[in-house]
Image: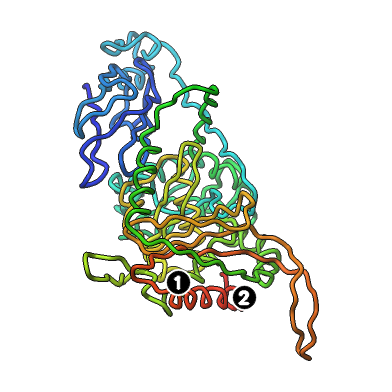
Amino acid sequence: MPTDIIMPQMGESIFEGTLTKWLKKPGDKVQRDEPLFEISTDKVDAEIPAPASGVLKEVKVKEGTTVQVNTVVGVIDGEGAAAAAQPSSPEPAKAAGAPSSASSNGPSRPPAPPQPQAQESDETETESAPAGSAQQGSNVTEISQGEGERVRSSPLVRKIAKENNVDLGHVPGTGMGGRITKEDILGFIQKYPAGAPHVPAQVPRPAAAPSAPVAQAAAAPAPPLPAPTPGEVVPMTKMRSIIAQRMAESKHTSAHVHTVFKVDMTRIVKLRDRERAKFEARNGVKLTYMPFIARAVVAGIKQMPIVNSSVEGDSIRYHKNINIGIAVALDWGLIVPVVKQAEERSFVGLQRAINDVAERARGKKLQPDEVQGGTFTITNPGIFGPQFGTPIIMQPQVAILGMGGLFKEPVVITDKDGNDLIAIRSIIRLTLGYDHRIIDGADADKFMVAVRNYLENWSEDIG
């Protein structure tokens, strides 16, 4: 039976989307929930999964076309999948309207092998790692696991479990209502690698090494855009035009002022070097510097709540929660997914959440509500080597923290006897951009002093 493919509504305030790329061609076999096409809205770029299994019969909307939500953009012929599932029939009928390659008397086309995600330096604060929730919260369903037990999971989680021969009945769920998240399934596979002697007998052993599920779950990075020819006029992409508009609006709205602080990160650098291998083995995620900075920001906001506010007319709204936006540089632009309620997360929870949103940003798996609601933003241009930058505030926020590069530098220190010495220390420059309409320089500097003190005197257990 044919199934219409519709342009989804990716948020309450979004009424149209641009279909940027079809990932399948007419006549290709598709599986339910596998990525089918890409869209771009004024909030986020995303991959849209197939609503049913079968054969892509018709494409009604061409790439680059902007249409209203709920518009039918293509059709999947479900009969093709049904015919392919009956190889034992002596003369299986071909799918109506589908090419002979999709019929049951020919081999089914195997899914394309997953491409490993491009590796980045360990110093990159937004590198991909197994963490976070499933790509489509609205697709969470319950599946039977025997003896009447029901397990809640998403299509992505079920796909990862199937690829690694894992029974979801053995995977504890930490999501709402006991839902198994992507973090749960990848953590389970990481904990019980193939051949590990400590795996209980009832726990199925995955067929691949721990690193394989991460690559399988991560979407292949988008290929870089071709370099423009000198003298060529190239139209802005939708994302680039939105970035341009938002940045100009912010400069016009907020009275930008910046303050730069040098922070001695030597204690944290030594801690990370000493604990990173054990941390990654224990938690299944890489240990980066970003959660250290995020925890310090939370501590600073608790002392200076004005930094976590916004302007509403002639009033100031002090936000109850600390929702930290993490700027992620993409080959095709910049996006700022939000880690909600950062003040309630542990150090490990922050690291997992940061890695998760960065990974899904690169894989175009973010949902619109995941790039909204931020109350404070951290951006990390330091991974590219600058001393510091002067970032632009994300509206309607009133402050943004920019991380500079981490460098070893000679520093004058005073020992316990009061003697001045020159020592080699690991130094980072943190820049706070703030809205001078409501944040005075003294308050901004008090916030930065709190952040600096938290980092230089780090005493928190990283888990």
The residue shown at (41%, 61%) is: 256
Q: Is residue 370 left or right of residue 212?
A: left
Position in image of residue 107 (x %, y %): 45, 15
Q: Amino acid at mark 2?
A: Glu
Spatial CA span between label 2 and label 1: 15 Å
For residue 456, which numbered disc appears in the image?
2
Determine the residue positioned at 40% across, 32% down: 236
Question: Which one is in front, 409 or 203?
Answer: 409
Height in image: 28 above or below 159? above
Front one among 207 and 217: 217
Which element carries disc 1, helix, strand or loop?
helix
| In the image, residue 311 above or below residue 358 | below
Q: Quadrant of residue 242?
A: top left
Q: For numbered disc 2, what is the local secondary structure?
A: helix
Q: Are marks 2 and 1 in contact (CB under 8 Å)?
A: no
Q: Is residue 449 above or below residue 57?
A: below
Instruction: Please give the residue where the numbered disc 1 appears in the rendered image.
Output: 298
Report crowding for label 2: few under 14, some 14 to 19, many 20 or more residues within 10 A (C-alpha).
some
